[in-house]
Structures are given as structure tokens and as C-alpha cells.
Image: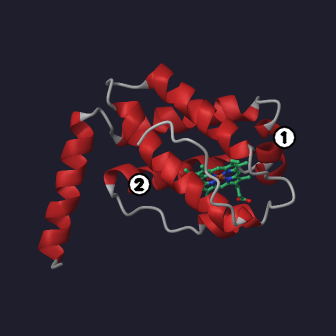
Amino acid sequence: MTRDRVSEARKAIQDNAASLGITTAYISTLVDTFYDRIRVDEVLGPIFNDAIGDNWDVHLPRMKAFWASVTLNAGLYSGKPVEAHRKHSETIESQHFDRWLAIFQQTLHDTAPTPETPAYFMIRAERIANRLKLALFGTSDLGAPRYD
Ligand code: HEM
């Protein structure tokens, strides 16, 4: 695609997302609320707090950039999620993904600006969670999707 076509496609994605209430301001609220809940979760909290320690001021902007890239095609994130999780393969277990997704879904439910917002994020979160699970555990037993 030429550069014009790329920016046209990006604009179409962003207009569609904006019509669902998905903006960088909403992503910021979503990410802050989600990790506030994750940090106090009895199962996932210790994993995140051990891994991230005093670096939440680095992790949160990175996660906002990640979600802006996934949902708004913002092109802001350039990390390596598989490697980032593989570093924690001693502590992250396959069933933790269900809990992560359940907390994410509840956070979306509680904060969503429109009724369509949760599915837009959840479809993408589940797809990425499944790819991470496959990369980390080599399992294709991905469970029943919440959204498809
Ligand atoms: C079992 C569930 C999960 C656990 C326990 C977990 C844990 C973590 C931890 C500890 C980090 C920090 C890594 C580090 O800097 O050392 C991290 C980073 C990250 N996680 Fe997760 N995660 C989970 C699921 C997910 C899912 C489902 C997604 C996406 C939908 C995701 C996306 C990311 C991204 C983008 C990063 C930043 C990677 C980078 O450094 O660029 N994670 N995760």
C-alpha cells in the first residue's frame, strides 16, 4: 500500500473505533482501572508486582501504547510480548490466562463508553491471549471463546 492508502486505512479504523467510544482517553482509563484490579488480585497480583516492581510508570504507558496500536492501529507499540512473557515462564501458568481475561472483561463491562466496546476489545484480547498461550505452552487447547 502507498503511504496515502495506509493513512486512509488507519483513519477508517480510527473513525470506526471512535464511533464505538474507543479513544486514547478511554484506553488510558481502561488500562489504569484494569491494572489497579490486577495489582490487588490474589493470584495475578503477586506475579505482576514481582515482575514490574517499581516500574509501573513504565509498564502502564507501554500497555496504553499497545492497546492503542491494537484497537486504533496507532503504530505506537513496538515490543515483543512473547519474549516479555517467556521471561516469566516459571510463574505464569496456562490457567492464569482465563483469570486475566475475566478481570479484563469485568473492567470493560464496568467502564465501557458504549455497549459495543467490550466485544471490540475482548475479541482482540482473546486472540492475543491464545497466541501467547500457544507460544508459551504449545497448547492448542484454548477453551471456549467468550466472544467470536
Ligand atoms: C496469564 C496472563 C498474563 C500474565 C500473568 C501477564 C504478565 C505480564 C507481565 C509480568 C508483564 C511484564 C513483563 C516484564 O516487563 O518483565 C507483561 C507484559 C505485557 N503483557 Fe502480559 N500477562 C498476561 C496476559 C497478557 C495478555 C492476554 C496480553 C494481551 C492481550 C498481554 C500483553 C502484554 C504486553 C503487550 C506486555 C508488554 C510487553 C513489552 O515489554 O513490550 N499480557 N505481562
Position of 38 compared to 91: left or right? Answer: left
Position of 43 compared to 31: left or right? Answer: right
Q: Hey, which residue is sitting farthest bottom in the picture? A: 2
User: On the rendered image, what quadrant is the C terminus found in?
Assistant: top left
Closer-to-camera residue (54/97)? 97
Q: Is mark 2 within 8 Å of ligand 1?
A: yes
How much space separates mark 2 and mark 1, taking CA atoms? 27 Å
Determine the residue positioned at 54% across, 38% down.
31
Closer-to-camera residue (28/21)? 21
Q: Is residue 27 above or below residue 76?
A: above
User: On the rendered image, what quadrant is the N terminus found in?
Assistant: bottom left
Instruction: Look at mark 2 in the image and give the residue it sits on.
Output: 70
Label for residue 118?
none
Q: Is mark 1 within 8 Å of ligand 1?
A: no
Badge 2 marks a residue whose secondary structure is: helix
Would you say residue 88 is visible in this rendering?
yes
Would you say residue 64 is visible in this rendering?
no
Determine the residue positioned at 44% across, 38% down.
147
Q: Are marks 2 and 1 in contact (CB under 8 Å)?
A: no
Q: How many marks?
A: 2
Position of 144 compared to 91: left or right? Answer: left
Badge 1 marks a residue whose secondary structure is: helix
Q: Position of residue 145 (x, y in %)?
A: 51, 41
